[in-house]
Amino acid sequence: MNATPMNAQDELLRAARIASSSSELNLPSKTASDWGMMRLLRGAISGRPRDHCPLEYEISEAGYKQLGIAPRGANCYLIPPDVLRTPWARGTRAGYVVGTASSGGNVVATQLLSADFIEVLRNASVTGRLGARYITGAVGNLDISTQLTQSQAYWVSEGSAPTESEATFGKVSLRPKTLCAFSKYSRQMILQSTPDIEILAREDLAATVALGIDLAAISGSGSGNEPLGIINQPSIGSVAGGANGANLTFDHLIELYAQPLEANAPQANLGFAMNAKCRGYLATLKSNTGSYLWSIDGGVSMATPSTIVGYPYTTSNQLRSNLTKGTSTGSCSELVFGNWRELLIATWGGLEIAVNPYDATGFTTGDVLIRAFQTLDISVRHAASFAVMSDALTPGF
């Protein structure tokens, strides 16, 4: 007698259960791409997520089991990295062609092109593109031993004893800190959402948290539960333009890259991070003959090279342009150069969402509140692997 074939949902649930027994989820790509945020929210609102969103419920349970942790509370669910890495392809839809009103326009409804939704303009991520090192799946506190100084060698005469010297050691510590995003969805949007709205909601949630992590990695203060970013690390290299800042020059960039090299920093993944104002200003600098200094052909094609003073770079407005130095108020930009593999970003678990359909204000309108949590910490292996300039002026930009 032939066994009854499993339907698609049964196969997905089976894949999730198999994943829960391994050290990592490693969900099949189809399982990850079929995960639905809006379906999970509808299940959470119903109070019976196991029945209304079995796939999402099973994946969340598998994630908690793999991490050995419990949910933060009722209606709290884990989105594993497998789902967040899924390339959610956008579909396309054809719009109506409408003539004059009397020729048919009056009978054509307005169509909302959700597939062509115009998203907010976001900063570009920096750390991932430049090669930061991610430590995923952390459970306990993390300490990484590091050698601070080395022992010394001495020339001695015959019969003389060398001077005693020892290496010294320290540690880089990573402790869980939580980044939170808070949003609200209307009940009707959740009930009537299309696949395009599903994609939008997931991408927005993931991008908001990812950019928050990226910004903390660059300029986190280290206080108020925020990680300590590169720019605020003690003993980091520094280039100063002047008492009131200085117009950015290529000499400043050379000074920036020289400092980690002079400190014997590892030379893999070296590169610059700068904002759009710095990049634009550098592209305008000319020689005495009128040729552009940073161009492929002296400015004929207006094309800029893929490197700057010999090193790759990335441009993002995650690098601030409103800093103050002396009388230069709110007009200074920051640039960072370093070995980006020396930047450590440790994450505990995946992205966790908590659903609250019972908020006092939202209850009367049917709105559902959602909080997203990501637990992580940030550190650097050697502060000397980075150098920063925080008083660069970019007149005209």
Image (spheres, rainbow, N blue to C red):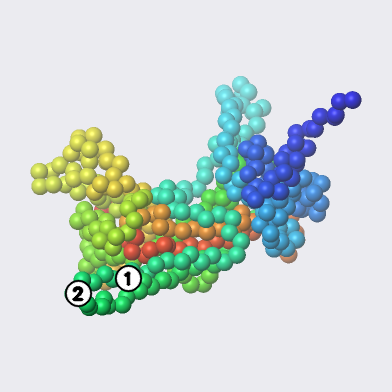
Task: Name the residue type under label 1.
Answer: Ser
Residue sitting at x 63%, y 49%: 24
Q: On the picture, is 192 further left or further right than 276?
A: right
How packed mark 2 is, by other alpha carbons closer than 10 Å (few <14, some 14-19, many 20 or more), is: few
Tag 2 secondary structure: loop
Quarter of the figure that contains the N terminus: top right
Q: Residue furthest right?
A: 1
Q: Position of residue 264 (x, y in %)?
A: 29, 60
Residue sitting at x 48%, y 64%: 144
State the mark number for residue 64.
none
Q: Which residue is mark 1?
A: 151
Image: 89 above or below 232: above
Q: How many marks are shown on the rendered structure?
A: 2
Q: On the picture, is 396 further left or further right than 204?
A: left
Mark 1 and mark 2: Cα distance apart in space? 21 Å
Choose the circle earlier in sequence order: 1 or 2: 1
Task: Name the residue type under label 2.
Answer: Glu
State the mark number for residue 158.
2
Q: Position of residue 263 (x, y in %)?
A: 28, 63
Can residue 230 be seen here? The reply is yes
- Residue toward you, 393 or 168: 168
